[in-house]
Image (cartoon, rainbow, N blue to C red):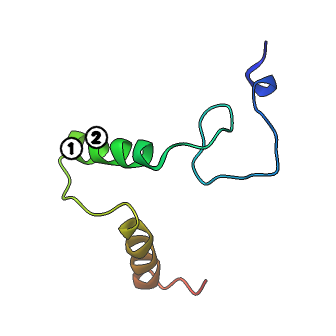
Amino acid sequence: MKSENLWEAGENFFLFSAWNSKPLFPSSVKTWWLRFIKRHELRYIHFHDLRHTSATLLIIQGCEC
């Protein structure tokens, strides 16, 4: 069976989903983020703070989006 056939289409679209389109538990994203930070020896910031970091970097680069 092809992996594309395993995707369960529906009305819901999640920002984070499992391989089969089912929603992830919020703790799954947080767990992944904490492991990523530790593995790469980064300073801890909340996952949501990435949004603000991205916006700041785009402003610094002169993006007018």
Residue 35 circle label: 2
Residue positioned 58% across, 87% down in the render: 64
Instruction: Describe residue 4's horizontal placement relative to residue 32 as left or right.
Output: right
**Residue 24 horizontal/vertical position (percent):** 54, 42
- Image quarter hosting the N terminus: top right
> CA gap, disc 2 to disc 1?
5 Å
Count residues near mark 2 (Cα–Cα under 10 Å), then give few for <14, some for 14-19, many for 20+. few
Tag 1's secondary structure?
helix
Residue 38 circle label: 1
Instruction: Describe residue 15's horizontal placement relative to residue 58 as left or right.
Output: right
Residue 53 circle label: none
Residue positioned 82% across, 51% down in the render: 11
Q: Is residue 52 above or below residue 31?
A: below
Residue positioned 73% across, 22% down in the render: 3
Quadrant housing residue 48? bottom left
For the residues labelled 2 and 1, say whether their Cβ atoms are less than 8 Å apart: yes
Q: Amino acid at mark 2?
A: Arg
Q: Is residue 18 above or below residue 64?
A: above
Between 9 and 65, the one lying in front of the other is 9
Between 5 and 27, the one lying in front of the other is 27
Q: Amino acid at mark 1?
A: Lys
Between 41 and 27, the one lying in front of the other is 27
**Residue 21 horizontal/vertical position (percent):** 68, 38
Quadrant housing residue 54? bottom left
- Image quarter hosting the C terminus: bottom right
Instruction: Describe residue 56's horizontal placement relative to residue 25 as left or right.
Output: left
